Image (cartoon, rainbow, N blue to C red):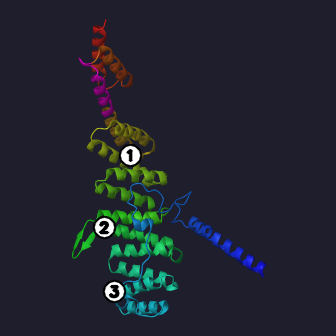
Amino acid sequence: MNGVKMKNTALLVLFALSLPLLAMAQSLTNPGVSPGPGVRYATDAYPGFDCEEDDINPQRKEPKWFSFLNGPDRDNPADQFAYCENLVAEAHESKAAKQFDALVREWPTSPEASRAQLRLAELKLKAFDSEQAFKEYRYLLDFYALECDYDAVAQKLYKIANLMRDEGKRIVFFRFKNTVDVRRAFEAAVLRAPGASWAAQALLTIASLREEEGKWNEAIKVYENLCNIYPDTQEAKKAVLLEARARMKVLRDCEYNRARSVDTHDFLKQALLSCQEESVVEIKELLDEVSALLEREAFLAAEFYDSKMRTARSAINAYEKFLSEYPNGKYAPLVASRLEELKGSTK
């Protein structure tokens, strides 16, 4: 008898250990989860994203207070689901949405819960409530991923995010641009389906929205991430030029910083190797601009030593160093002439 119990216990342990492996196997075969060679998760680093708490640690719905007013109108999930469908058939869609939600809250682990959550999301979308529809579809993926068509729902998230961007935020009868909420919707979609066919384009959109917010450094991070995760896509090739422009925006607007200038210069040199052919001329122009900035900084640094407070030898060393770095530069003739004067005066 003890042997039977031990055997059953061992089988249960093996089954429990196999669950994570089964989940991983499913994620690997699901194109909406894997971006290619490896699986990415919502907790992975996505520089430039806000990564809200709902994305990292989503919370389950709970029954609302005053259940006699807000709770389900039927005694079990099967009857409740049928009741909700009848409400829809009778065109009471607003009440049906509330009752579908009540079902999910009251019986979250029932077979009807995932179906009710899907119907709730569909009704919100049909009612032109894009923001709430997005939240309900997101909830479906977060808590009923194995009970729905994951890729189809993720695709729906992306479409609704685009819809939110086109529509703006509605307050009473007016619509307003709502860049932050729209960007976070795109981020939530990417976090849940980084391997989707639209993920690279979504990252381009997120970077663009960051630029609209004036958050250029955050936009640069998104462009970098796009090129790192999806290096062979057309979106990555476009991102090279867009990142170059964003870097130049930061360089021009901020107080001069040599480290930033050198970093931008190095990036532009690499960008010439990976950008689209039609972007080469513009990136070369940007590179020339940064090179000129670095040359001027080097000239001013050398000129600093050419004063009454410094020795002639210090100035000569500084100018010689400048000429070794910029022998054909804009300031080279001026420096060479001054260098001859200094050397003549020391004889």
Q: CA distance from mark 1 to mark 2?
A: 29 Å
Identify the residue position indicated by label 1 in the image.
278
Residue 302 rendering spot, x and y as whole percentages: 31, 23
**Among numbered discs 1 and 2, the one appearing first in the sequence:** 2
Residue 153 rendering spot, x and y as whole percentages: 46, 73
Magenta highlight on residue 163: no
Mark 2: amino acid: Asp
Q: Can residue 166 be seen by looking at this rendering?
A: yes
Horizontal side of residue 255 vs 126, given as left or right = left
The C terminus, quarter of image: top left
Which disc number belongs to residue 166?
2
Front residue of this view, candidates 70 and 192: 70
The N terminus, quarter of image: bottom right
Quarter holding residue 208: bottom left
Q: CA distance from mark 1 to mark 3?
A: 52 Å
Identify the residue position indicated by label 3 in the image.
94
Q: Which residues are magenta?
A: 293-309
Magenta: main secondary structure equals helix
Quarter holding residue 202: bottom left
Name the residue located 37 percent from the left edge and 76 percent from the top edge.
Answer: 133
Label pair 1/2, CB-CB below 8 angstroms: no
Front residue of this view, candidates 139 and 234: 139
